[in-house]
Image (tube, rainbow, N blue to C red):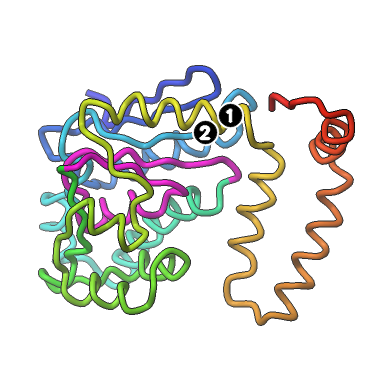
Amino acid sequence: MDVIKTIVENRVARIVLNRPEKRNALSPELVEALKISIADLLSRYDVKVIVIKSADKPFCAGADLAHLAKIRDFSFEENLADSQSLRALFDLIHGGHKIFISQVEGPALAGGCGLASICDFCFATEDAQFGYTESRIGFVPALVAVYLRQRLRGSDIRDLLLSGRIISAAEAQKMGLVNEVIPAGAIETAVADFAAKLCTTVSSASVSHIKNLLKSIEGMDIPQALDFAAELNARARSGADCIAGIDAFLNKTKLQW
């Protein structure tokens, strides 16, 4: 059985985690399959939005137990390579020039919570749960901590990462980890409608520039960030999408991107 399924329809790709018997745990095979699928989707002109969801609850229960048993005997070099593989997956989502949405039904824990929260938007069912539970078994949620600096307050990051506690979808929304909490029977339609709207109302070039901007200015001081932003703005203005947008605004016509 394939560990993921990828479906593309009307410029929206859906990547379905398909290890329900293993609670969609992040095995090396699943991480690799996700990287291959996402890299392919990022290269496709017929894809604008990418939704990551699960075939069944939970969304993703974190690390694969069989893999955890193996890493007890890993060398530092092997552990570093394993960590870099997950980093490469997160980088594809965080820095990829398309919009990513996580559709979370059921628990999203440890690495699974990282996968859910690294996306640009996160929609969750009312019974979804979130937790960076690594500290409970002596691990460190190191990679996701870097990305969370753009999403959560420092006090909330410390709370979640140090305590390892599991929170409800409602609390995750209050923190800013989740964009919207939706009843289980309505989430599929809600995410599909949101993705379809993004496909027609926002420019692909603008999305690419904005994601590049947000990734690049992290760590810059204010003058550096403003210099980078001004240069990016100047380049974007000469692009076809910006010219089309100006023409539509001046002519009072509505664009369908």
Disc 2 and disc 1 in contact, CB within 8 angstroms: yes
Location of the C terminus by quadrant is top right
Q: Is residue 21 left or right of residue 18?
A: left
Viewer-side residue, 91 vs 249: 249
**Nearer the observer, 191 or 147:** 191
Identity of the residue drawn at 51% across and 26% down: 196
Circle 2 sits on which residue? Answer: 49
Q: Residue at x 65, y 53 (%)?
A: 210
Residue 116 painted magenta: yes
Amino acid, disc 2: Val
Residue at 17%, 52% in the rendered image: 67
**To which quarter of the image does residue 157 belong?**
bottom left
Over which residues does the magenta segment extend? 97-126
Query: Which numbered disc covers residue 34?
Result: none
Identify the element where label 2 is drawn. Answer: strand
> In x, y percent, where is residue 198?
56, 33
Q: Earlier in the sequence, mark 2 or mark 1?
A: 2
Total labels drawn = 2
Residue 24 percent across, percent down from the top left = 20, 39
Q: Separation of disc 2 and disc 1 at Cα?
A: 7 Å
What residue sits 70% from the left and 44% below the top?
Answer: 206
Q: What residue type is disc 1 on?
A: Cys
- Place of residue 79 in the rendered image (x, y in percent of width and height, measured from the top left): 29, 66
Question: Which SS class for mark 1?
Answer: helix
Query: 189 above or below 20?
Result: above
Q: Residue 142 location, x and y as percent?
A: 33, 71
Question: Which residue sits furthest top?
Answer: 9
Mark 1 — residue? Answer: 199
Q: Is residue 37 magenta?
A: no
Q: Is residue 28 visible?
A: yes
Q: Residues within 10 Å of mark 1 (few under 14, many from 20)?
A: many
Which one is in front in this view, the residue at disc 2 or the one at disc 1? Answer: 1
